[in-house]
Every structure is written in C-alpha cells, then in structure tokens.
Image: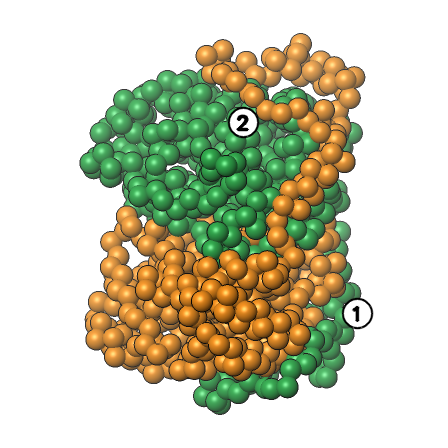
Chain colours: A orange, B green
C-alpha cells in the first residue's frame, strides 16, 4: 500500500493506545463531515517495477535522440561523470535549507564556494546562493534596482531573451513600472535608442551578452551612459561564454543575473535550472535570496552561516526584499562542482571549443544554398541565419534527418519567420556539423 | 576544512573538454574578451571527489538522520524516483523542442507526465485545473495571488488587502506585497485557530483574498474553515490555500471542497521530491473555474486526435511566469511517487503522518508546554518556555539534539508561540526512531534542571561548534576572492 511507512498494525495499535484513541479516524475529528472529500478518485497503486516500466514507456515517446543545434538559453553541454556521482550523494540532496549551521557545513561551505565562483566568473564582488532560473532572476534584479534608486522606468534592450521579457511583463503588470523596449540594430544594442530614452527617471537598463541572437558585445559605453543618469545596469549572461568573454564586472555592470543550466545541469525539459545573481558589494543589502557568509565558531574555527537574513521573508515578512524561500541550492552546488572540476583552464578551453565549432558551422553553412549567415557582429556559440523558407517549417523538415535544427524566431519576432538561431556546443562533432549542413541544403532545395 | 580554491595547484586539471576537431578557430577581438581568466580552482578529479565527498559528510540529511523539521515535511525520498529522473529520455530533453514547427510530437511522453499530473493533483485537491509551472511554493503563491489580482481587475473590483493569519509562513505576506497588496494580519484564538471575531472586523469590500494553511502552522485543523470561506466569499474575496501542510489531509479533505479558489502544492514536501539543501522545489497551482481563464501559459491540452499540445491562446491569462513548463524533473519524480502509492497509499500517508505526530505530542506533553492541547495533525507545536525559565532555550535544546545525531525540529516558528519547537516526524519514520527522539527530548528536559549551563557548549560532536552569526553579518565575507585579494 505504502512501502515507505514503517508502522506495522501492532505499532498502530500500540500508538493509538498511547495517544488514547480508538481508531485512525479519531485523529481527524476536527474535519467535519461536511468538509470531507466529495471524491478521491485516484488510480490504484503500482509496484516500483511497474512504475519504472510505465515511466520508461513514456520516455520512449520523447525524441530525445535528436542531435541538438538548438540553444535559446539552454545548452547541450556535456556533464562529467564525477559531477553526476557527487551530486547524487544523499547527504546533499536529502538535506534541508541549512538552518542549523553546525550540521549543515557541507551545504553552507559549498554555497560559499559557489558564490565565490560566480563572483570570479562574472567579475563581481558579491553573489547570492541562487534564485529559481535565469528569467525569474532577471525579474528579481529589476525589483532590486528599483529598491536601490527608487525609480520606476526600465529600458529593456531587444537583445534580451524574448521569453525573459514575457516573464517580466507578467510580474510587473500589477506594479507601477514602465517598460521601454529598444530595438536591436545590425545584431547589436542600439546605443542611439537607449540614449534617447535614458533620463533621470530610468531605474535600470537591461542588457544581455551574448544577446538572444548570439551577438557578442562590449556594453561598457552603454553602462557608462546609463550610470551618468543615475540608472543601474542589469546584465544577463551565459556563464560558459565567460570562459572567454569580457565580464560584466569589467564592463562595470551593477547587477548580473543569468541562467546557470549550462554549468553542468541536464536539460530536463526546462527545469530545475539555476538562477544566479551577483552585484557590487555596496548593494548587498538590497539583494534578494539567501547569502552565505564566513565566520568562526566558539573555538575560532572557520565556518559558514546564512547571513543578512533580515532581508528575507521569514524575518521581514511583507517588507522582505523578495518572497523567495526555497531556491535551487542543489543546482548551485552542481554548478559549483562543474566549475571546480573544469577549473580555470577547463572552462576557458570549453569556451574556446564552443567558439571554434560554432565558427566552423558558420563557415560551413555560408556555403549552403538558401542560407544567409548574419555576419554583422561577432558571436560565441550561437548565431542567426536567414533561410529562403519559413524557419519553423525547415526545422520540422530537419527532424526526420535527426536534427533539432535551431530556434525559429517567428513566434517571438513577427516578420522574422525566415530566421533561425543555431547553437553549436562542444558536443557537436565536425561530422555532425557537415551532415547538418548537407541536410539543411537538401531540405531547402526540396522546399523550392 | 579547506576551500576548494585553497586546494588549487597551478597546472592541475580535473576534466578536459573534447578537442575542437575542426579546421578553423573562432576569432574575437580583444575588446570582447576578459582580461584575466576566472580564478576557478585547478584540481585533479580525485582532489575534486575527496573535497565534495568530505563536504557531503558535514551535512545531516534524511538519508542519515531523523529530520523532524516542522513545516518542512522531511519524509524519506524514494531512490527509484531519483534514478528515473536522471535517465535519458527526460533528462536530455531540450525544452524548446516543441517550438520546432509542430514539434510537440517530439515530447509526447513529457507532456503526458504534465497532463496526467495535473489531473492527479485535481483529484487529490478537488481543484478544477492545475498549472505545473511554478518553480517553488513561494513562486506558486505569487502565481496564485497574481491570478486573484487578475480576477478582481476583470470584474472591475478595486481591492487593496490580502488577509493572512498571524501564524502564516513569511512567504504569504511577502508574496502579497510583491503582487501589489497590503496585508492585514489576523491573530489566533486560544485554540490556535484564526480568531473569527477579529476576521469579521477586518473583512471589508477592500479585501482581495485570504491566504491560509489548513491545517495551520500550529498543527491544528480549523473546524470552521468552511465558515471562513463563506465570510471571505461574501465580500467577493478569494480563498488561497497554502498547500505546505497538505501531507496531513490526503484523502481526508480537499481544499476545493472546503471552498478554496486557488492553492499551491509543494511537491518537495507532500510528494517527496528531495529538498536538495534548500531547493529546487516545485509549487504547482490549482484553481477552480472562477480563475481558470487566468492560468499562466502555456497550458497542456489534448487535441481531438488524442495528441497533447501546448496551448498559448488564452487572452485573459496572466502570461508567462516561468520560461518553460515548471521544474519538470521534480514533477516527474512526484508523478512516479503518486502512481506508486495510488489512492490507498496516499490515504495511508496522511494517516500515519498524523498518527506519528500525535504519538510524539502525547509522549512529550508532560515535559514541554503545549500551547494548543488538542489532537494535532501532521505536526505539533511545543513551547520551551518552562525550560527557558531555567535558562535553557529552544535553540539550546536544538543544539543538544544535534549531538544525539538528530536534526532539530523547527524552532522559533510559528512566531505566535514563544520558544516554539515545531515537530513534524512524517509518516516514513519508525516508532523506534520516534522513541529515541522522545527519549532525547526528555533527557534535555532533565538536563535543563540538573545542569542548565552545560547547554551552551552544545553541539560538541560536529565539525564546528556554534558559529558567531553576529560577526558573519558585521564583517561580511561572502566571497573568497574579495576577502583574500591575493587569491584572485
């Protein structure tokens, strides 16, 4: 019935006797007859063997064997076995939020190491111990910026993920916030348009690097302009790219957020992922989410605790910096493991291989009839192509060839139905790229 | 213990990415590149394994320790759901595959998990529809309260307040504030239930809704919950059920039948997805028909030909609340758990959770003050005020328990009870484990009489003793590299 219950019938009898009740039913006397379920229509239970077989049957209904050239914020990177082995330790995954530091130093130290790793990766001074995902982290950053400067206008660059932009719209619909969107011009943030909108009411400018179309930029000039107006700059980043790219810290961004899935987390059909946030030290008290700090114990030994908890909902209630409670600690620890195992050289190499393979794919696809590779800006491992046909239909036609061809832009960008974003990670081989190009050419020819 | 950064040796490597294998190399101008490499550690794979193995050993966990943390439902996390979730077929599935033309046919198995899970949760809770998207309990609350706001906006109602009981989780008032509402707190009566007289005073046409756990954080079930729902509905307010305590009532009552309009379920509590040291969680939200048009998009629908699809065509929807379809890998674990337990297994879950909680309560009530002396549900709330008079506080008892190899109960919550000790054993613990816990609690009480001063030294068996939390906040060191600039 329920194999995870230890009580035997004689335990139940003895326990009820201890409590002084006759039956299980007596335990629920406060639930009046009129409050009882109208129905409880659930299937009968199954054995573990049967559930496993059933779920594997469902898994087989998914096309998980496709070769992925699709990114769009979630990337098909390899996860080393050592990361998978260590994150599967029950001591990590069956622990709760570290409210009792003496028996939670494993989680707490790992989160301190995670914060430090995020800081060195992004070039920032402080980071929190995680938020849900890259999209909701961006919303938290917007709220944080408004808490810092008390302004209400947000300029959002067109290069920010359209999915994240939709999330922001939802959360702010009941709040007194004005969003202004600026277009992307030749693949890059429009300096002119952003400057036009910037004024002394601008709370923050949101930028993404590489942007959604894959373009790499140096936003230092925009950031300088924004800060001259007293606005903050929020930078959304792709962490693996920071193995090579100029950091938001070097550009002097004020708040950095990002999706950490690329740091060793499975694609998992969208979650759980890892939202992270980093900022300047002077803003730490305005930052949402848990923060782990170093201290010493009564014997002077170094140790770690949740700190600055007076920002959080369990202390501050309606005046908290966020309503977040459960975050994604385990995903943060997994990302830390990934960053630690790859290390300084490994992450740089990983970024370099992504860059090289994507460049090879760009050059290969340039020679394919019906494909125009956008060359107006440098890219990392993702780039935009224009096709002679509807990208969504092309992507569909590539499936029988075994490819998830890319992200068709039409749904989010009316008028860009022929455009597609292609991602090439270290997992794509030269042979796969060549075959992909060949199939794409064939598909486009057949559509003529 | 050393930090991973302190184990770093220049030139050491734990993993090599594949070599490029392509005849070209990408070029980036210097202005686009970082000036210095990130100071990530340089360790061998064995260094790495030992470091994280040792870190793991510095944690208490359900797998190794009794963990009666009230309000958190730390039940055993079955191993088979872990292995299922990490198998290819789901773990390797890219969330944007449905966007490849009619790409939903690529993810029919995953959509079936979501679709079936929605209907299982509807059957369990009595709600009419579910969205699986919210990424944690508090995220579910925010989704729910945004739907409440959308409902009032559509009706042209001008509402300002959300009512919460004083015993509520901190997330309730924090959520209401982020959604643009002010909160009104209603105190509890002497039995631990919401004070109906004061609720009546506070209710007005300006009230958008009421958020409540049931059973509440005092561990008791309010027999008048139906009356409360009627009072709130009479001012056109909506009832929000915080599902944090759902583990108490599976098969015994359903929020939908009690008059709740919207609720969230914590899959990481009742449906045993692991807590992971503080997440990830999953907080699906259920609504009745009043609110269904406002549910977030996308929604999983069954087409005429029986295929499942993602539908974005709901003009009244509050919109996107998460990038994709929720924390899928957790939803999958919870789905497998519910299918294994089935109807009778779920009913037994709550029966034994409540039995275990009452067993502990009965055995401890001679020794510890029990502010609400009545049958409890899945948890009981004691006060250590008697021990505090001897100089031994709830926190001291908590540290004593750590030395017994047990994770302490929740302390100092709910805020309504002085020196609160909130004990939730869950259904998966054995009588022997609970007896050991009771014995430890009694020993603590004895010691509070004989040697109250000895508590200041607990715990003694952990890698560290009590940390200096004031120093942590005052000297703020949250980043190894800024604390030790020479390391960067």
**Is residue A427 shown left or right of residue B469?**
right
> Label 1 marks which chain's residue?
B
Q: Where is residue A3 in the image (x, y as percent from the top left)?
A: 74, 30
Q: Where is residue B419 in the image (x, y as percent from the top left)?
A: 54, 37
Label 2 secondary element: helix
Q: Position of residue B436 (x, y in %)?
A: 76, 33
The one nearer the camera, A440 or B445, is A440
Which residue is disc 2 drawn over?
Answer: B124
Left/right of residue B360 with respect to residue A170 in the rendered view: right
Which quadrant of the figure contains the N terminus of chain B? bottom right
**Quadrant of residue B437 within the rendered picture:** top right
Please tell me whether residue A212 is drawn above or below residue A41 in the rendered image.
below
Q: Identify the residue at image location x=69%, y=70%.
A: A341
Q: State whether residue B63 appears in this view.
A: yes
User: Is there any visible trace of residue A94 in the rendered image?
Assistant: no
Front residue of A186/B249: it is: A186
Q: Which residue is drawn at 41% across and 63% down?
A: A390
| Observer-nearest of A101 and A419 | A419
Query: Which residue is label 1 attached to?
Result: B46
Q: What crowding class fits label 1: few (fewer than 14 Cα within 10 Å), some (14-19), or many (20 or more)?
A: few
Side of B117 relative to B163 (left or right): right
Which of the two discs, 1 and 2, labels the residue nearer the N terminus? 1
Badge 1 and badge 2 in a common chain: yes
Please report contact status of discs 1 and 2: CB closer than 8 Å, yes or no.
no
Rendered residue at 60%/86% (across/down): B24
Nearer to me, A36 or B82:
B82
Residue drawn where x is 50% and y is 37% of the image: B305
């Amino acid at each position: 019935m329920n194999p995870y219950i230890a009580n035997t019938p004689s335990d139940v009898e003895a326990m009820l006797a201890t409590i002084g009740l006759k039956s299980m039913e007596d335990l629920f006397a406060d639930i009046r007859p009129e409050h009882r379920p109208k129905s409880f229509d659930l299937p009968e239970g199954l054995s573990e063997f049967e559930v496993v077989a059933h779920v594997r049957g469902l898994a087989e209904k998914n096309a998980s064997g496709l070769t992925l050239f699709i990114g769009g914020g979630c990337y098909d990177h390899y996860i080393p076995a050592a990361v998978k082995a260590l994150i599967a330790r029950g001591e990590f995954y069956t622990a709760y939020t570290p409210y009792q530091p003496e028996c939670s130093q494993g989680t707490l130290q790992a989160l301190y190491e995670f914060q430090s790793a995020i800081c060195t990766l992004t070039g920032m001074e402080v980071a929190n111990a995680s938020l849900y995902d890259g999209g909701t982290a961006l919303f938290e950053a917007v709220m944080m910026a408004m808490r810092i400067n008390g302004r209400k206008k947000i300029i959002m660059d067109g290069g920010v993920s359209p999915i994240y932009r939709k999330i922001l719209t939802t959360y702010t619909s009941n709040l007194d916030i004005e969003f202004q969107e600026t277009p992307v011009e030749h693949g890059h943030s429009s300096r002119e348009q952003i400057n036009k909108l910037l004024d002394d009411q601008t709370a923050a400018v949101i930028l993404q690097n590489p942007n959604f179309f894959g373009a790499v930029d140096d936003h230092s000039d925009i950031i300088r302009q924004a800060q001259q107006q007293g606005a903050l700059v929020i930078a959304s980043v792709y962490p693996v790219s920071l193995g090579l790219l100029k950091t938001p810290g070097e550009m002097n961004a004020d708040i950095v957020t990002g999706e950490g899935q690329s740091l060793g987390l499975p694609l998992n059909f969208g979650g759980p992922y890892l939202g992270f946030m980093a900022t300047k030290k002077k803003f730490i008290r305005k930052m949402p989410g848990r923060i782990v700090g170093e201290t010493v114990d009564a014997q002077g030994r170094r140790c770690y605790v949740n700190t600055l908890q007076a920002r959080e909902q369990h202390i501050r209630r309606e005046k908290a910096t966020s309503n977040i409670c459960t975050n994604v600690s385990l995903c943060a620890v997994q990302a830390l493991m990934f960053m630690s195992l790859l290390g300084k050289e490994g992450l740089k190499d990983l970024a370099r291989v992504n860059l090289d393979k994507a460049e090879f794919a760009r050059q290969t696809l340039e020679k394919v009839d019906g494909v125009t590779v956008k060359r107006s800006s440098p890219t990392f491992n993702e780039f935009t192509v224009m096709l002679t046909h509807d990208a969504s239909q092309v992507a569909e036609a590539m499936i029988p060839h075994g490819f998830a061809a890319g992200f068709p832009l039409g749904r989010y960008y009316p008028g860009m139905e022929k455009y597609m974003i292609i991602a090439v990670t270290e997992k794509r081989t030269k042979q796969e790229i060549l075959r992909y190009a060949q199939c794409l050419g064939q598909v486009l020819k057949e559509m003529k | 213990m050393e930090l991973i950064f302190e184990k770093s040796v220049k030139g050491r490597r734990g993993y090599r990415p594949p070599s490029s294998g392509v005849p070209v190399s990408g070029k980036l101008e210097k202005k686009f590149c970082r000036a210095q490499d990130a100071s990530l550690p340089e360790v061998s794979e064995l260094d790495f394994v030992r470091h994280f193995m040792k870190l793991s050993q510095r944690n208490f966990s359900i797998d190794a320790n009794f963990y009666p943390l009230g309000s958190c439902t730390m039940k055993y996390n079955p191993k088979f759901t872990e292995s299922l979730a990490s198998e290819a077929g789901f773990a390797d599935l890219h969330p944007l595959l449905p966007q490849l033309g009619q790409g939903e046919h690529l993810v029919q198995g995953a959509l079936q998990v979501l679709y079936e899970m929605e209907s299982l949760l509807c059957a369990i809770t009595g709600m009419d529809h579910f969205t699986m998207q919210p990424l944690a309990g508090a995220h579910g609350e925010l989704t729910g309260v945004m739907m409440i706001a959308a409902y009032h906006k559509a009706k042209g109602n001008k509402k300002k307040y959300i009512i919460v009981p004083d015993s509520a989780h901190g997330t309730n008032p924090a959520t209401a504030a982020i959604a643009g509402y002010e909160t009104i707190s209603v105190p509890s009566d002497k039995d631990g239930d919401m004070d109906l007289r004061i609720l009546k005073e506070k209710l007005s046409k300006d009230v958008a809704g009421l958020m409540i756990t049931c059973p509440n954080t005092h561990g008791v079930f309010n027999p008048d919950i139906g009356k409360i729902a009627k009072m709130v509905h009479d001012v056109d307010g909506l009832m929000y059920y915080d599902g944090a305590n759902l583990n108490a009532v599976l098969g015994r009552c359903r929020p939908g039948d009690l008059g709740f309009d919207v609720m969230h379920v914590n899959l990481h509590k009742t449906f045993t997805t692991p807590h992971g040291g503080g997440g990830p969680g999953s907080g699906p939200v259920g609504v009745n028909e009043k609110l269904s048009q406002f549910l977030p998009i996308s929604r999983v629908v069954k087409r005429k030909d029986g295929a499942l699809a993602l539908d974005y065509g709901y003009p009244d929807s509050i919109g996107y609340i998460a990038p994709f379809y929720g924390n899928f890998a957790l939803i999958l674990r919870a789905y497998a758990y519910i299918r294994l337990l089935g109807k009778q297994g779920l009913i037994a879950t709550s029966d034994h959770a409540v039995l275990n909680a009452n067993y502990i309560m009965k055995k401890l009530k001679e020794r510890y003050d029990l502010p609400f002396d009545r049958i409890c549900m899945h948890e009981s709330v004691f006060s250590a005020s008697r021990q505090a008079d001897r100089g031994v506080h709830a926190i001291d008892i908590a540290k004593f328990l750590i030395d017994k190899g047990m994770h302490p109960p929740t302390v100092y919550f709910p805020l309504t009870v002085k020196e609160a000790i909130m004990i939730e054993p869950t259904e998966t613990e054995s009588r022997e484990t609970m007896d050991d816990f009771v014995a430890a609690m009694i020993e603590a009480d004895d010691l509070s009489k004989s040697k109250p001063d000895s508590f200041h030294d607990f715990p003694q068996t952990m890698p560290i003793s009590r940390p200096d939390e004031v120093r942590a906040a005052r000297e703020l060191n949250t980043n190894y590299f800024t604390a030790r600039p020479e390391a960067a």
